[in-house]
Image: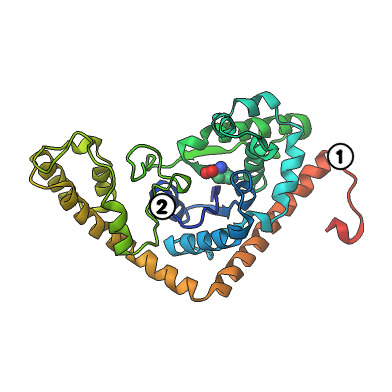
Amino acid sequence: MPRIFSGIQPSGDLHIGNWLGAVQNWVALQARNECFFSIVDLHAITGQHDAATLERRTLDMAVGLLAAGVDPARSTFFVQSHVPEHAELMWLLTSVTPLGELERMTQFKDKSQKLESVPAGLFSYPILMAADILLYRAEQVPVGDDQLQHLELARVIARRWNAQFGGGTDVLPEPQSLLTPARRILGLDGQAKMSKSLGNTIGVLEGPEEVWQKLRPAMTDPARKTKRDPGNPDICNIYTLHKHFSPPETVVEVARKCRGAEWGCLDCKRVLADNLSAALAPIRERAASLRADEGAVRAVLAAGAERARAVARVTLAEVKARMGFLPAAGPAGR
Ligand code: TRP
């Protein structure tokens, strides 16, 4: 079975953008692939790092992913910092990572521009991401289009490392991207990608009332000033969400009643709120029972980390041997 790696940051609650854009696909991929899914907490400290909430956000993300269908019996599901080999391989890979490539990363350029003082971790972030993937010799990496450049760099790093140390073999195979079928999901502002840091999300675990409170003020067709104006569903993010959460006949009805000004935006949102809440209800229920036994969730993550480490150790040992390090004798060598 092809091996897959993907990661998600512990932003706390999983939102419908993550779900439609990534996690639904992860869940589907489990059927035919050997999957490694990680909550990448080491990446999370390159943003606004809040030590007081990191543990909570990590656990909440684990609950959300398990509730959404990540299955620890089929996939290796773990927290990145529980597998120290990620950080160690990253350091080894810094020696084959071209500085110029890191400087070209658009995400780094965007994020660093907004900062007065730029942490080196933000700059090195793509090397850690390469280490995540190469540690498991993953062949395919499901990502959104915003991560394609990072993945391309992971390929460059693998190629360079192989050329320098591989002795003619691809010890670290170049990973392929697996573009996620769902296009990027816009936030409730109808402008930017749905993202926790922009506060424009609906959480997968939010109840019907919270969903409604968030949808009610959400952006629609800005040209539609009153109920009597006909609307244009094609530029309305609420209509896009209908396509994901409402049955096909409702999607057709929504478009017709919007164009014909038969429904106001609130009528349309009410239908979406009901369908969205119904679609998420089973996930919410599973999350509630997982929350009731957090010890079990921690145990699942511990078992996942053990499984991940067993693979990670082998790769790291081979990488270090080929790079010429003196093997540690005795217990430290294990
Ligand atoms: N950088 C990715 C994101 O922000 C998360 C990530 C970290 C990742 N390591 C990865 C994704 C490895 C795929 C493979 O979405």
On the image, the x and y values in percent for residue 241 come to: 28, 47
x, y percent for residue 20: 38, 49
Count of all numbered marks drawn on residues in the image:
2
Q: Residue at x 61, y 57 (%)?
A: 79
Q: Is residue 228 left or right of residue 167?
A: left
Left or right: 183 in relation to 76: left
Figure check: 135 above or below 168: below
The numbered mark, 2 or 1, whose residue comes first in the sequence reads 2
Alpha carbon separation for disc pair 2 and 1: 43 Å
- Image height check: is 294 above or below 209? below
Q: Are marks 2 and 1 in contact (CB under 8 Å)?
A: no
Residue 103 % position (x, y): 64, 26
Question: Is residue 70 in view?
Answer: no
The residue carrying pointer 2 sits among few (fewer than 14), some (14 to 19) or many (20 or more) residues within 10 Å by Cα, namely: many
Q: Choose top left, top right, bottom left or bottom right for residue 81.
A: bottom right
Residue at 29% across, 47% down: 218
Callout 1: helix, strand or loop?
loop
- The residue under the point 63% across, 48% down is 45
Provide the residue designation for mark 1: 324
Instruction: Give percent across and percent down for residue 223.
Output: 19, 33
Q: From the viewer's perspective, is 184 left or right of 108?
A: left
Seen in the picture, residue 68 relative to 146 is either above or below; the reply is: below
**Residue 62 seen in this snapshot:** yes
Q: Amino acid at mark 2?
A: Trp
Viewer-proximal residue among 305 and 207: 207
Which quadrant of the frame does ligand 1 lie within?
top right
Q: Amino acid at mark 1?
A: Gly
SS for callout 2: helix
| Residue 19 tag number | 2
- Determine the image quadrant of residue 139: top right
Q: Nearer the viewer, mark 2 or mark 1?
A: 2
Please state which of residues 265 and 295 is positioned toward the viewer in this rendering: 265
